[in-house]
Structures are given as structure tokens and as C-alpha cells.
Image: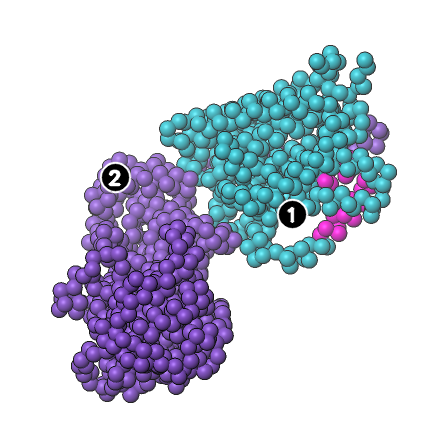
């Protein structure tokens, strides 16, 4: 080693020496000079952190009506006073809170690493328990009652599939990452969104918890405050949903289901769904799924909800898919017109029943429509016409146009999780699932919305909107605006065009004209003929294959209105509700009457059910 | 087999000091982890002892290869290091705080720990290669690039403390390599001047981390609280301490990371001023021996390896103990040989292996 390096090594070692002298002096200062002071501090170490839970962001409808808010509630917590928790305290608490001792011990164990924080045992306890605990405060050392915000779903079972609910549980994926970035660490006992908006928007809804550094006395009551960090409330969500309309949709669906169950003795009924959106933006105005549940009492009701065969927790508008039946026939119509296999003037002969490829298929009740154009075929839902179109097009064309309309893939709703892709009937699908070749008879079924074709109600609403707006597929959304604690808008939704389907305007017009005739006398939804608003629609009666022959078909209806300047697109399904005209159309009628403010003007009248369509 | 001279030149004192430090660490770990694992009170001690055994094995491997070879392999080490630091950002599992690990099934591998010793080897080679231009302010600059790349990768984890270690190692080794002091001051000045630029590229939460790093009182509910509890623990230990396993602060788990980052607080409470001074003396002896070997080494590469290791250990001791005594900001740097955690122990033992290696081969072997 050269001289210079040696010199520098000496300098280095003297620096290290200085560092060690500083550390030793500090150590001596704390342990020898300040010993008495710190010894007392340690003996009476009653400094604790009391977290202050930030109020969660509230949720409002499109008109500013409060849907989800917070109310104060009492929480029982345990604070470690330096000696752990006595078996007596635990056993008494177990009795008072109706919790098993094992459960309390588990919660204590979970917080082993953070003993300086209170352990939250039970939230939202009733006043009686609060009184009992306060009375026995001296015999329950370390037991605290804190006031905490409790989530309140103002309208109970209002759109629970959209709103979601909270629960204790871990967080995953991007939510966890987002928190990590914002320096928030999930702690056992924290309530987090488990479904719906509450889950997807968790990072925005959750505020930043604050806290207090306090000194507690021998019973665990805070007697002195040292440091305080105020909580920051979460962001509020303003939805595209109109609460009045949503309630009406839920009510109309519920009534239809009730009618099937009670009046028709239909044991298969009980489930229904509807989606209504703005065809010019993708804003979802209403989205309902029946049966429903109440997020306020979700935790108590859970065992029953989980057992229910009708699966109330599932959002049937996006998480399940069904055959579209005749409501799907506009896909076939657009395909046939665009591919030029039919003209708007051509008439196809409908004898009522045909036999092709060894299968005999017919129109509703074998009714013969005679020589019929595409307009009348849509209006009267003639199956024979569409069988012919299907055969002219072939399955590959049908599948192509189906995908153009957004079927077979998520429509793109990101504000809640769980949107399903549905199924586009195609050679590839059959090959991959059944490993069988495609049969022409299946092409005929596909042309009328049966065979393997299966769609979510959101897809059906989006496809109807695309007919109304001329091929624009907008991303559907539920959150219009996000507002922070100071009332500043931090995020504003903008319509997003996901896909544009290029179809000639005259072909759109042909289909629209056919759909407009559906709601006129002679159409399958003639029940809507008396409304002063012009409505374009299409009924569907979707046979459920592969099951009991007597099982009632799904009742569907899709519509947009007003025809001249569409404001809304709607899709309704009443599962196993019978024909489209009989069950889904009256539901749509109520919804549209509410939307257009016609409830008082129009007296609903009974129509006979002629012209109802069904396959086979 | 080994030349006899290798044994003759072997620094048994250094090895002994290191082993005593490890055992001292095991003792304090056994106290600070009581009750963490209800089934087996010695689970943590057992694990750490196993790591110590692996560390000894690694140390033997390190010393059995002539350190001249490490000069040759330096760039392979560097490449491997960058590789691991990159993949950990994608496949890494996040532990407490922000450190990232790669789950290897049997144990968790923490590339940022290994990066410390690799950086020492790489810089030793680089500065030997720079011998002719070490006086030149500009030509020495590329060494910064070699440090900044892995540093940024670690910063992304994000682990600010470990990233800081790199800068300190670089400055320590530049100084020992003979860089003029005025040049070092110029680099430091430039670094400070570039800070606002760097700052503008940070995300808000990263800025917040830096702010809290500089001023822990801004976070009174977590770091501020932890620091206060640490001081109470140490101060209440007094001259003799409350006795092993007797610390009330430790028993209450007031210090969430008491067996890792805050192990010195437990030691201070239970073994008192005497226990603390013994530990500091052991560290001083260790660093002294390392620098002694540096001064004996046969070449500049060996000397730089030793000074790199000395810098690494002294800086971590300063920052960690300084943190528990509340004279340094809170960072996640472990206390060498003492903190619970296998990766850190293993890497520290490997770095002592490097120093022993240099010491053993201080004279040219004659056949």
C-alpha cells in the first residue's frame, strides 16, 4: 500500500472512531444521564395510537340524491395496557358482545405486531350493549367504546349489484397496489369493498385514516392527547343512474316475477334483469337484477343468500348470459342486408312450417305469414323468413356480424367487476367445446337467436343502442363524476367510442322501420301502440334447450325510444317468463312510461296476445 | 490444497470477532422474538442459526478462491446483479415496508442485499482500472453511472436506504482510491445541485417518503411513535439493562420491527449501556481489523475490496444505531450481523470472507 493510501486509511479509521464516539455519547446520555426519566416513562408507558377512521366517500345518483352515506355507530375495542388481556375480561366481553372467546383471541393474535393499536372487536353495537359496557367500565380494563362511521345504504335494496357492499377481507391486485403507492397498508379488521362500486372504486372511496397519539389511564380511557392527524374523507361518486328510474325498473321486474310465481304458478320463474342506457354515450341509466338483497343487512343475511338457488348475489344483467331468441333477429337482418342476400323489397314465402336438413321448424303455432318482406318479418317475428336468411348467409357471416355488434366479448363496463363475454354461435365455438362439426340446421337456429348464441343483457342493450345510433359501440359506464372532500371534481367520465360498425344508413333504416312496426297494431309488442311516444322494439321468446320440455321460455324485449331521436336503449329479460310479448313487454312499458313521464296520461289496456312468436 | 502460508496469514481475530457478533445477534434475537411464534419460541433463532451456518459455508467458498479471480469475474457479477434487481421488480414479493424478495421456495432471496457486496467488488475493479485517471474530475465520472443504474433499480422497489448505501460506498472507495478531496466535494456539490431536477421526476408518494425520511416528525403516528418508543426502551435500560428477556418495551411489541431494524433498542433495554458499548467495541474492532488488512494487501484491488467492506459495515452501523437513538432518520437498513434476516447476514459474512481472502494472500505465493 502506498503512502497516500495509508494516510487515507488512517483518516478513514479516525472518522469511524468519531462516529463511534458520537454513538457512545448519545447512548451514555440516554442510559445514564436520562435513565431515571426514561425508566419512569417505560413503567408508565401508556402512550397509544387511536386511529380515526376516515369517512368513506358517499354515492349519489345522477340528480344528486344520496344513495350511500355514513352514519355514526359504536365500536368496541380493546387496548393493551401493558399486561396483556385477562381471561376474565375476555370471557365477560364474550358474553356481552355475543362473540366466542376463541374469536376474540384470534383478533388479539392478528394484531400481535401492532399492540399499540386498539383491537376492534365488534362494530355497530346497539345502545343497550354500550350502556352495559359503560356501567362495568372499571371491571373491564382496556375495553373502549369508539364512535366510528358505519356505511349506510339509504334505500336498502337499491341496486345492490351496482353499489356492492363492504366486508372484512384482504385486498388483491391493483387495489392493493394503488394503496401501496399511496402508503396505505391494509390492517386486519379494516372494512373494504367486496363487490360492485364499493370494490372497484375502493381506492377512491376510502379516505386516509387519521389518528391520535394519546396517553391512556389504567382503564384504557384517553386522558391526554399528544399528536393528532386528521382523517381525510374519501371521494364521492356521482352516478349515471337515476334513482327514481332505477327503483321503477326494479319494481316492474319484481312485479313481473311475482306475477309469474303467484298468478301463473310458474315454479321456474323468479329471476329477471334489465339494462337501460343512453345510446349516445354509454351512460347506464338503470341496471337491475332480481332477486335482490339489502347491503345493510348483508352480513346477517349472507347464509341465506348464499343458499338461494336463484343466486341473488349475482348481477344477472352482466354476470349471466342467455339466448336472445327473436330479440336477436336484427343481427341476422343487418347481416343479410349488408351481405346483399336479401333486398328490402324481396318477399319470402312463409308456409308456417318447413322441413330442411331433416328438421321440421315452424313459426309461432304454425301460423303461415304468406309472402312476407323483411319489414313484416321483423314486425311479426317470422321464423321461416330468418331461417331462410340464415341459410343464405351461412354461420360464418352470422358469427362475423354478431361480433360486430359486440357479442362474444365484454361490452366494456369497468366500474363494476364480473361482466361475462357470452357466446357467439360459430364453428370454432362448437369445435372447441363439443369437438363436433357445424350443422346447417344449427345455422337456422342461430339466425333466430337460438342454438349456442348467448348474450348478457348489457350486450343486448348495447346492440339495441348501436341500431339506434347507427353502429356506435360506446363503453358503458356508471360513474359520471368523482368529487373530493373539498367539493372539487377530480374525475369526469367521458363517452368512449369503443368500436364503430360500418353499415349503410339505408340498411339501418330498414331495420329501424321494421322495429318501429313491432310496437304498432299487428306487431308482437302491440301493447305499446297506445303510448304517445314512438318506440322501436323487438320481442324475444327464448327456448331453453336441453332441459325439461315444459320449462317456460325466457321472455325478452329490446327497445329504443323515441324512434325519431333515440334517448334510451333498453333490454329486459324475465327468466322463464313465457313469451316476450306477454311478460317482458309490459315491464318495458312501465319503464318507458316512467321515463317519458306518461304514467298519469295513459291508462294501460289489455291486448289480446295475437302475433306472439315462439320458435319451432 | 492450501499453501501453509495461507493459514499463517489468516486473520483469526477478524473471524472470531465476526462469530462473536453473530452469536451476540442470536442472543438478542432470541429475546426479541419471544412469543412471535406461539408454537416454537426459538423458531426465529433456529432459522437465523441456520443462515449463520450457510454464511460460514459461503465464507469458506469465498476464501478458497484467490480474490484475483473476483477481479476477473466482476462484470459477470455486475450483469447478474442487474438481472436480479430487474426481475425482482416484476416477480418479487413485497415484504414489510418496501423491500422486495424473490421466493425461491426454500428461502426468500433479496437481491438488494447481495447487490451491496457485488457493488464493492465491481467498484474495486473499476477504480483499479481507473488508476491513471483517478485525479481527473471528468474521467472518473463514469464510475457514477455504474453505481446509479443498480441504485435506481433499488430505488424503484422502493428502498431508499439501500440506494443510499451505494452512494456512500462509492464515495468511500473513491476516497481510498486516491481521488482528490476537492473532486469529491465537487461531485457532492453537483449531486445536491441536481436534486431539484431529480425531485421533479418523483411520484407524490415517493416525495412524501423522502420528506418523512428527512423529517420523521411529519409522521407522528408511525415513525415518530416508533422512534419515541425506541428511545424509551434504550433509556430505561440504564447502565446494566433490565436483563435478557426482561425488557418491558420489547415484551409489548411497541417496536414493530424489533427483531430486524430495531434490534438495538431491545439490546439497549435488556443489556443496558454495558451491552451497547460491548457491541460498539466489537464493531470498532471488526472495522479496525478490516482496514488493517487493507493496509497489508499486496495490491490496490485487495485494499479497495477491504475499504469497500469497511465503508459498508460502518455506514450501516451508523445509520441503524443512529436511527434507534434518534439521531438519524428512519431507514430500513439492518444492523450488520445482529438484525434478524438471512440475506443480510449471509452478505455480511461473504464480505468478511472477501477481506479474509485479501489478508490470506497478502504475499505472493512461491512455488
Q: Assign a secondary structure to mark 2.
A: helix
Name the image quarter holding the N terminus of chain A.
top right
Mark in front: 2 vs 1: 1
Q: Which chain is cyan?
A: B
Figure quadrant of residue A317: bottom left
Q: Is residue A39 left or right of residue A163?
A: right
Residue A358 position within the rendered picture, expressed as x and y whole percent measured from the top left: 30, 62
What is the chain identity of the residue bearing mark 1?
Answer: B
Residue A56 is at least partly visible in this image:
no
> In the rendering, which numbered label is found on residue B152?
1
Q: Nearer the viewer, residue B172 or B266?
A: B172
The residue lying at 63 percent from left, 46 percent from top is: B153
Give the residue at x 69% y 31%. Answer: B310
Say which of A17 and A435 sits in front: A435
Magenta segment includes B172: yes
Residue B112 lies in quadrant = top right
Is label 1 in a helix, a strand or a loop? Answer: helix
Q: Could you tell me residue A478's position as x and y percent?
A: 40, 68
Report the chain shown in purple: A
Mark 2–mark 1 distance (CA, rounded to whole Å): 50 Å
**A225 in the magenta segment:** no
Labelled disc at residue A101: 2
Do the residues at pointers 2 and 1 share their chain? no
Q: Residue at x 39, y 39 (%)?
A: A112
Q: Dividing the picture into quarters, in which one does residue A116 lie?
A: top left
Magenta span of residues = B170-192
Q: Residue at x 51, y 32 (%)?
A: B107
Amino acid at each position: 500500500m502506498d503512502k497516500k493510501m495509508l494516510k487515507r486509511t488512517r483518516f478513514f479509521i479516525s472518522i469511524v472512531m468519531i462516529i463511534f464516539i458520537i454513538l457512545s455519547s448519545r447512548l451514555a446520555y440516554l442510559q445514564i444521564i436520562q435513565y431515571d426519566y426514561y425508566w419512569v416513562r417505560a413503567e408508565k408507558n401508556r402512550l397509544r395510537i387511536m386511529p380515526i377512521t376516515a369517512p368513506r366517500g358517499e354515492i349519489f345518483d345522477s340528480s344528486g340524491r344520496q344513495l350511500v352515506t355514513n352514519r355514526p355507530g359504536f365500536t368496541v375495542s380493546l387496548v393493551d395496557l401493558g399486561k396483556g388481556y385477562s381471561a376474565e375480561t375476555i370471557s365477560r366481553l364474550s358474553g356481552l358482545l355475543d362473540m366466542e372467546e376463541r374469536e376474540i383471541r384470534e383478533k388479539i393474535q392478528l394484531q400481535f405486531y401492532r399492540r399499540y393499536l386498539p383491537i376492534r372487536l365488534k362494530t355497530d353495537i346497539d345502545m343497550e350493549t354500550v350502556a352495559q359496557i359503560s356501567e362495568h367500565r372499571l371491571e373491564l380494563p382496556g375495553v373502549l367504546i369508539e364512535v366510528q362511521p358505519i356505511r349506510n345504504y339509504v334505500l336498502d335494496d337499491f341496486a345492490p349489484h351496482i353499489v356492492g357492499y363492504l366486508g372484512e377481507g384482504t385486498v388483491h391486485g391493483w387495489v392493493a397496489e394503488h394503496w401501496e403507492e399511496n402508503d396505505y397498508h391494509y390492517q386486519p379488521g379494516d372494512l373494504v369493498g367486496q363487490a360492485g362500486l364499493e370494490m372497484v372504486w375502493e381506492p377512491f372511496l376510502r379516505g386516509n385514516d387519521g389518528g391520535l397519539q394519546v396517553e391512556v389511564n389504567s382503564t384504557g380511557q384517553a386522558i391526554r392527547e399528544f399528536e393528532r392527524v386528521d382523517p381525510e374523507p374519501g371521494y364521492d361518486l356521482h352516478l349515471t343512474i337515476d334513482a327514481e328510474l332505477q327503483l321503477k325498473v326494479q319494481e316492474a321486474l319484481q312485479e313481473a316475477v311475482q306475477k309469474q310465481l303467484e298468478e301463473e304458478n310458474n315454479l321456474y320463474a323468479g329471476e329477471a334483469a334489465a339494462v337501460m342506457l343512453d345510446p349516445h354515450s354509454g351512460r347506464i341509466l338503470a341496471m337491475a337484477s332480481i332477486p335482490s338483497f339489502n347491503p345493510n343487512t348483508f352480513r346477517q343475511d349472507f347464509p341465506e343468500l348464499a343458499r338461494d338457488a336463484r343466486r341473488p348475489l349475482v348481477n344477472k344483467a352482466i354476470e349471466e348470459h342467455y339466448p336472445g331468441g327473436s330479440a336477436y333477429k336484427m343481427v341476422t337482418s343487418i347481416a343479410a342486408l349488408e351481405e346483399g342476400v336479401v333486398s328490402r323489397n324481396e318477399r319470402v314465402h312463409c308456409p308456417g312450417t318447413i322441413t330442411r336438413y331433416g328438421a321440421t321448424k315452424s313459426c309461432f303455432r304454425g301460423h303461415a305469414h304468406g309472402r312476407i318482406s323483411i319489414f313484416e318479418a321483423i314486425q311479426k317475428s317470422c321464423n321461416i323468413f330468418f331461417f331462410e336468411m340464415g341459410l343464405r348467409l351461412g354461420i360464418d357471416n352470422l358469427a362475423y356480424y354478431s361480433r360486430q355488434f359486440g357479442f362474444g366479448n365484454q361490452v366494456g363496463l369497468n366500474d363494476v367487476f364480473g361482466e361475462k363475454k357470452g357466446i357467439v354461435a360459430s364453428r370454432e365455438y362448437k369445435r372447441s367445446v363439443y369437438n363436433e362439426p357445424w350443422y346447417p340446421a344449427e345455422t337456422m337456429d342461430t339466425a333466430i337467436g337460438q342454438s349456442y348464441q348467448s348474450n348478457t343483457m348489457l350486450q343486448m342493450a348495447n346492440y339495441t343502442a348501436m341500431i339506434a345510433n347507427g353502429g356506435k359501440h360506446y363503453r358503458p359506464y356508471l360513474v359520471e363524476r368523482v368529487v373530493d372532500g373539498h367539493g372539487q371534481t377530480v374525475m369526469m367520465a367521458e363517452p368512449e367510442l369503443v368500436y364503430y360498425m360500418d353499415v349503410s344508413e339505408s340498411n339501418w333504416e330498414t331495420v329501424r322501420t321494421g322495429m318501429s312496426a313491432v310496437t304498432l297494431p299487428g306487431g308482437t309488442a302491440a301493447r305499446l301502440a297506445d303510448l304517445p311516444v314512438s318506440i322501436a322494439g323487438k320481442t324475444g321468446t327464448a327456448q331453453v334447450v336441453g332441459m325439461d320440455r315444459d320449462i317456460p321460455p325466457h321472455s325478452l324485449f329490446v327497445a329504443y325510444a323515441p324512434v325519431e331521436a333515440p334517448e334510451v336503449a333498453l333490454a329486459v329479460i324475465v327468466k322463464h317468463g313465457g313469451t316476450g310479448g306477454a311478460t317482458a313487454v309490459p315491464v318495458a312499458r312501465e319503464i318507458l312510461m316512467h321515463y317519458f313521464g306518461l304514467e298519469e296520461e295513459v291508462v294501460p289496456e289489455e291486448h289480446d296476445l295475437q302475433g306472439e312468436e315462439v320458435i319451432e | 490444497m492450501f499453501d501453509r502460508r495461507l493459514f499463517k496469514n489468516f486473520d483469526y481475530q477478524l473471524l472470531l470477532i465476526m462469530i462473536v457478533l453473530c452469536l451476540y445477534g442470536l442472543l438478542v434475537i432470541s429475546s426479541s422474538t419471544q412469543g412471535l411464534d406461539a408454537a416454537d419460541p426459538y423458531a426465529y433463532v433456529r432459522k437465523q442459526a441456520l443462515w449463520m451456518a450457510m454464511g460460514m459455508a459461503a465464507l469458506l467458498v469465498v476464501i478458497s478462491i484467490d480474490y484475483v479471480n473476483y477481479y476477473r469475474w466482476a462484470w459477470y457479477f455486475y450483469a447478474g446483479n442487474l438481472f436480479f434487481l430487474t426481475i425482482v421488480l416484476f416477480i418479487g414479493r413485497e415484504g414489510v415496508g418496501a423491500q422486495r424478495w424473490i421466493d425461491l421456495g426454500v428461502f426468500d432471496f433479496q437481491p438488494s442485499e447481495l447487490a451491496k457486496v457485488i457493488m464493492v467488488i465491481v467498484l474495486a475493479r473499476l477504480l483499479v482500472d481507473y488508476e491513471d485517471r483517478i485525479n481527473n474530475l471528468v474521467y472518473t465520472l463514469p464510475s457514477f453511472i455504474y453505481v446509479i443504474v443498480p441504485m435506481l433499480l433499488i430505488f424503484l422497489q422502493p428502498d431508499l436506504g439501500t440506494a443510499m448505501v451505494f452512494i456512500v460506498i462509492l464515495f468511500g472507495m473513491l476516497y481510498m482510491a486516491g481521488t482528490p478531496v476537492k473532486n469529491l466535494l465537487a461531485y457532492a456539490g453537483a449531486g445536491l445541485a441536481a436534486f431539484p431536477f431529480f425531485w421533479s421526476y418523483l411520484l407524490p408518494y415517493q416525495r412524501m417518503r423522502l420528506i418523512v425520511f428527512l423529517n420523521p416528525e411529519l409522521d407522528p403516528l408511525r415513525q415518530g411513535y416508533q422512534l419515541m418508543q425506541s428511545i424509551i426502551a434504550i433509556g430505561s435500560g440504564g447502565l446494566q439493562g433490565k436483563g435478557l428477556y426482561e425488557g418491558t418495551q420489547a415484551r409489548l411489541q411497541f417496536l414493530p420491527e424489533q427483531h430486524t431494524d430495531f434490534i438495538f433498542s431491545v439490546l439497549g433495554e435488556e443489556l443496558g449501556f454495558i451491552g451497547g458499548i460491548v457491541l460498539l467495541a466489537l464493531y470498532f474492532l471488526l472495522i479496525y481489523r478490516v482496514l488493517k488488512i487493507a493496509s497489508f494487501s499486496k495490491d490496490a484491488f485487495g485494499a479497495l475490496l477491504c475499504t469497500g467492506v469497511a465503508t459498508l459495515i460502518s455506514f450501516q452501523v451508523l445509520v441503524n444505531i443512529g436511527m434507534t437513538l434518534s439521531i438519524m432518520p428512519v431507514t430500513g437498513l439492518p444492523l450488520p450481523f445482529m438484525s434478524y434476516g438471512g440475506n443480510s447476514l449471509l452478505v455480511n459474512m461473504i464480505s468478511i470472507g472477501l477481506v479474509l481472502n485479501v489478508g490470506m494472500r497478502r504475499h505472493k505465493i512461491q512455488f
